[in-house]
Image: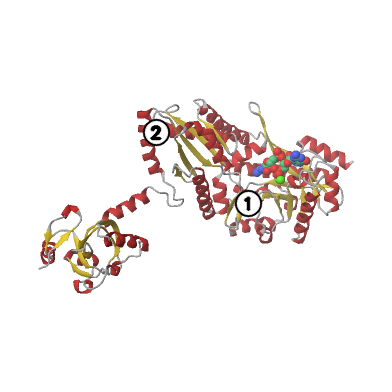
Amino acid sequence: MKMMNITPSNINQVTYSLKELQDIFSAMNSSIIVAITDRTGKITFVNDHFCKISKYTREELLGQDHRLLNSGFHPKSFFREMWKTIGKGEMWNGEVCNRAKDGGLYWVKTTIFPFLDDFGKPYQYIAIRVDITAQKDLKKITHIAYQDELTGLPNRRKLDQRLEYELHQSRCTGKKFALFFIDVNRFKNINDGLGHIIGDMFLVEMAERLRNVDYTSNSIYRHNSDEFVMILNDVDRIEEKAREIINVFNESFIVDTYEFSASISMGISIFPDHANSIEALLKNADTAMYAAKSTRGNQYRLYRPNLDEINNQWLLLETKLHQALRRDSLELHYQPKINLKTNKMTGMEALLRWYDPELGQMSPDRFIPFAEECRLINDIGVWVLRKASAQARAWNEIHNLNLRVAVNISPIHISTPGFAAMVQEVIAETKIDPHFLEIEITEMSMLDYTEDLINTINQLRALGITISIDDFGTGYSSLNYLKTFPVDVLKIDRAFVQDIVPEKSGIAMISAMISLAHALNLQVVAEGVEEEAELNVLREHGCDFVQGYFFSKPLSVEAFTQLIVDSCM
Ligand code: C2E
Ligand code: CA
Ligand code: CA
């Protein structure tokens, strides 16, 4: 009987006959999976457990090589390396994913011992395997449990672990770390306006951009829907990192067919300077984030103890706006719109004004986004519509005029179910002729192609209301909606009017916009006309209406009444 040496050293020098080995392995009633192959890899022996796990019979296995079990999981180089090692007579260790006869995958921790002949060349291999499928699955489950499904970032659970670790480290070493709380401004507008699929795609893109800021340290976490957290160990770099993150949002987002800009608010707190527990650290970063938000878009704030006070002020602002609405202390100003063919005023835009005795004069640019955020915008919209309609009807009746009043409606409001019915009620209540009512909606509202929105617009137009697209040309590059949407008027944003003089390319742009609008049977209003030279260019290129300081600033009801009286004389 031929005797053989088994290498390497742990079982070195022990000599067994093949038969003896096979007997040992067969007798071993354990979970160990054993196979013996010849020099070329052909299977010459398998134990029962091998058959059990691979679901092949012994007959099916003998004479085959291990490629029978190939799962396709490992690259070819994996097995090449293995063969290189055992071919040299060295032991090989590794974790291998195999495929059973029924197609199921299983993982085995594998050790292969070469049997060497008298010349030191392997002529036979013995492979001993242990089933580790359960551990592998566990690992996979663990991975999923700690990973955010949408963005692939580590999730909140993982963040908790990390924070506990950092807290411990910090307490031991005295080193500080910072927590950045990042929140998308008005994410709801993206989600409600463009649909949650676009919202999701935006978040994925955003996560990718954040990951790029933090490419080395794996420290960005998805905390909640549109909230992200970053951990920074080098607190000297807080400002630099905060800027980097803010800069990420300078570039607009292109999601599906939409292009839009987004901004974030960010709050930062430092352990242990600002908190002595994880909860407090998160809460204070959140407080700082709110403070950043109240100062409007794309800002960051480091936590300070009196920030709570600032946030209380925000709450105060909300309360005050509520009150102003209830007590009817908001005001509308009116800016004339001039027909360039007749040089006559044909209507006016109602613009909201809010004066608070404590806070002073608040610009709509400041409080409208705030009202959208705290959901007061719908009530405000109804108030404006009612007030402006009643006022326009009164002017037209008293002075025997045909002025059309334009009201700005937030995208959030117009997408609210029942909007058209509400407008109808206001018309009935104020008795305005709907032909003297115009609704201005920004391009943002147009981006969501839902049937509901088209229906709303159709209903409004069926009543005789004019629909115009406000701020045309700003930010959104999808022109498709112009073909799809039943609108009447395009309002070219002031930014383009400003570009007319003295720059010639601005003229080409305006001219193109006017031609486009006319080709689509839309009338054109140019906003923010301040100079005669601008007016002349607009007239020359066939613009229908203008609005701007050149003719008049927005006027109070009294001043506008005076304007009417003066121009009637
Ligand atoms: P908008 O709808 O684009 O209104 C035009 C803004 O440009 C007004 O600012 C107006 O005062 C200003 N403007 C008019 N002519 C000129 C000009 O020749 N030069 C310059 N530099 N500016 C001019 P305002 O009143 O501060 O309103 C700002 C924005 O707030 C509005 O922009 C509109 O988006 C929003 N807003 C105003 N009132 C309401 C409202 O009742 N509801 C809603 N949802 N938004 C409103
Ligand atoms: Ca407007
Ligand atoms: Ca505008």
The image shows residue 212 at horizontal and vertical percentages of 51, 46
Q: Is residue 448 above or below residue 379?
A: below
Q: In this view, does 38 lie above or below 255?
A: below
**Lower sequence index among marks 2 and 1:** 2
Res 88 → quadrant:
bottom left
- Location of the N terminus by quadrant is bottom left
Mark 2 residue element? helix
Q: Which amino acid does label 2 sit on?
A: Ile
Front one among 11 and 256: 11
Q: In this view, does 446 lie above or below 99?
A: above
Mark 1 and ligand 1: say if the CB distance to the nearest ligand atom is below 8 Å: no
Front one among 383 and 428: 383
Q: Residue 278 carries which label?
A: 2
Q: CA separation, marks 2 and 1?
A: 40 Å
Q: Characterize the local packing of mark 2: few (<14), some (14-19) or many (20 or more) Cα atoms within 10 angstroms.
A: some
Q: What residue type is labelled 1?
A: Ser
Front one among 81 and 32: 81
Mark 1 residue element? helix
Residue bearing mark 1: 445
The image shows residue 415 at horizontal and vertical percentages of 59, 51
> Which marked residue is nearer to the observer: mark 2 or mark 1?
2
Asked whether the viewer can see residue 334, the reply is no
The image shows residue 315 at horizontal and vertical percentages of 54, 32
Asked whether the viewer can see residue 108, the reply is yes
Front one among 284 and 112: 112
For the residues bearing labels 2 and 1, Cβ distance under 8 angstroms = no
Seen from this angle, which residue lies furthest front?
119
Ligand 3's quadrant: top right
Residue at 61% over, 52% down: 259
Q: Characterize the local packing of mark 1: few (<14), some (14-19) or many (20 or more) Cα atoms within 10 angstroms.
A: many
The image shows residue 247 at horizontal and vertical percentages of 58, 41
